[in-house]
Amino acid sequence: MATIEEVEMGRYAQELEDDVRHLVRKYCRIMAWDVPDLDEQAARRLILAALRSSVTLVESE
């Protein structure tokens, strides 16, 4: 049986995914200001890697 915390996280899973998508779009826009011919796929990979690193750092706190 799932704990109450797991049930709550299940409710927020879609919202978390939406938030990550929003962050990727936000930082792609910011990068595009400085890089006129931005390779969006490459930028997206870099942003997602940075987000993963940030999550790892926060987990270790």
Image: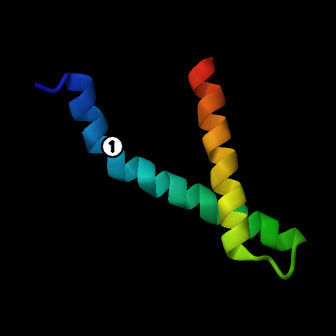
As helix, strand or loop, the secondary structure at mark 1 comes to helix
Residue 50 appears at what percent x and percent y?
70, 47
Q: Residues within 10 Å of mark 1 (few under 14, many from 20)?
A: few
- The residue labelled by disc 1 is 12
Q: Quadrant of residue 58?
A: top right
Residue 26 appears at what percent x and percent y?
66, 62
Residue 31 appears at what percent x and percent y?
80, 66
Q: Can you say whether 20 is above or below 54 in the image?
A: below
Image point 20% across, 24% down: which residue?
A: 4
Observer able to see residue 28 = no
Residue sitting at the far top: 61
Relative to residue 9, is residue 55 drawn left or right? right
User: What amino acid type is highlighted by mark number 1?
Assistant: Tyr
Image point 80% across, 76% down: which residue?
A: 38
Image point 60% across, 55% down: which residue?
A: 23
Q: Quadrant of residue 3?
A: top left
Relative to residue 61, is residue 11 drawn left or right? left
Relative to residue 9, is residue 57 drawn left or right? right
Image point 66% across, 28% down: which residue?
A: 57
Could you tell me which quadrant the N terminus lies in? top left
Could you tell me which quadrant the C terminus lies in? top right
Observer able to see residue 43 = yes
